[in-house]
Image (cartoon, helix red, strand yellow):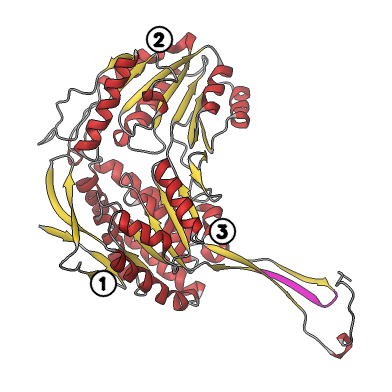
Amino acid sequence: MNTIQHWINGTTVAAGQDSRFADVVNPATGVTSGKVALASADQTREGIRAAAEAFPAWRDTSLTKRTSIMFAFRELLNARKQELAEIITAEHGKVVSDALGEVSRGLEVVELACNMPYLLKGGHTENASTGVDVHSVRQPVGVAAIISPFNFPAMVPLWFFPVAIASGNTVVLKPSEKDPSAANWLAELWKEAGLPDGVFNVVHGDKEAVDTLLTDEQVDSVSFVGSTPIAKYIYETASAHGKRVQALGGAKNHMLVLPDADLDITADSAVNAGYGAAGERCMAISVVVAVESIADELVAKIAERTRGLKVGDGTREPDMGPLITVAHRDKVAGYIDAGVEAGAELVLDGRTTSPDADSDAAFLNPTLFDRVTPDMSIYTDEIFGPVLSVVRVPSYEEGLELINANPYGNGTAIFTNDGGAARKFENEVQVGMIGVNVPIPVPMAYYSFGGWKNSLFGDTHAYGAEGVHFFTRGKVVTKRWLDPSHGGINLGFPTNS
């Protein structure tokens, strides 16, 4: 059986004889494909130490050299992205084309990082005061710990480490133990691209490894994406130990549909955004907020499209693959049970499945609820599965109030042909990422990704300009080259003269 080991200081490092391991299971087949080593605190520190020792030389490596390695990595990743997509499907279960899309979105951030010489370019003011010049620079923070979730084993790490590495930091990546192989594949690609040993390290593990990364004094920054309770824990623990932290949490994303919207396009979008990747996306639409006058027609159109979806093994290119584990499938099915018990109208029941797969272990069909109310658990909780809820409201105002009252503020969308209503929504909604007739408004790499309220802990969003600022610190240098005319004692406060 394949054993997935750590990658430290440019090579595979085997776990010790007393190490713990976790099974890696293909959720589409139920077959255990391998086991992954779970690092102890001591072995996690080996990865941290390798990154810390590599940092001074990498920090002082020229921007030209760092960028040339980034370009080489980009070319290798682009040429071999199909291979990485197939690795993701084998361990996560998502459809291969969806996995390929994940890699492509991660590539956007690599391409952003190829532009790091411009992104790090400081400012300069000549003669700010007589004979005094001022300039600014941004310098790397140090060792960056990245803790990534199971749902995007390539894209989420790619949100962080290209920016961190190109700006002169070194990295320790702790991927999800559920689908760990993508991280090692990326590490080997870095080696091929010419990245010096120790700049990029992969430590597999569970809470013991995570807690070590959050508390070790040689770690300078922590980046995380995952559920809100864990994001809050990571933020509080790491910041208490002096780390710079960006912790992106959970979501409950709403799509507000106004009466003038094109309902065919809206229904297509709701299905795409609600059921893609089996709903295991932090930007998935899980709540359709329909103005009452068009709710019946919209629900009928969503149901019609959903009935035609094919569920199965991601390698066979169905519309939707399995959930990540049988346990998670059972948890999501429990929410469907709860929705029925609470009185929501079950339009489509996904608990009975006949997937195109060799096992039905982790599969759940798309589920649609209508007449959901805000007190039901299928509304309040982040289900992270293929369950779409429709909440009916009398008007735009009540829909906006519902969205703003939600404790999450990750993503939202409005579907309308009224430009004034859309502009009003952009201004008034309390959410970090907004789509106008766009159901999954994930920003391009040159913007930044992140939500508001309980969807973000820390002040900095991922990638884009905010990502560059997170992985660097600013300095301002005020300088004057002295000549004899500047001599003498003057105890007065310095002025700009």
Give the position of the N terminus as an image quadrant. Answer: bottom left
Instruction: State yes or no: residue 434 in magenta.
Output: no
Q: Position of residue 251 (x, y in %)?
A: 43, 36
* Nearest-to-viewer mark from 2 and 3: 3
Label 1: which residue?
11
Determine whether the residue tagged by mark 3 lies in a helix, strand or loop: helix
Q: Position of residue 291 (x, y in %)?
A: 50, 14
Q: Residue at x 36, y 38 (%)?
A: 281
Image vertical order of residue 221 relative to residue 341, above or below = below
**Residue at label 3?**
469
Q: Quadrant of residue 336?
A: top left
Q: Distance between the Cα atoms at labels 3 and 1?
A: 30 Å
Main secondary structure type of the part rendered in magenta: strand
Asked whether residue 483 appears in the rendered view, the answer is yes
Residue 103 image offset from top left, x and y in percent? 34, 50
Marks counted in the figure total 3
Label 2 sits on what residue type?
Asp
Q: Is residue 89 above or below residue 237?
A: above
Q: CA distance from mark 1 to mark 2?
A: 59 Å
Circle nearer the N terminus (3, 1)? 1
Q: Earlier in the sequence, mark 1 or mark 2?
A: 1
Label 2: element kind: helix
User: Does the CB distance between marks 3 and 1 fall below 8 Å?
Assistant: no
Relative depth, front residue between 287 and 82: 287
Q: Is residue 363 left or right of residue 187?
A: left
- The magenta segment is 130-136
Give the amino acid type for the residue marked by disc 1 in the picture. Answer: Thr
Query: Which residue carries the number 2 mark?
Result: 296
Residue 474's image quarter? bottom right
Residue ID at (20%, 68%): 14
Residue pictured at 44% horizontal, 65% vertical? 219
Of pointers 2 and 3, the one earlier in the residue sequence: 2
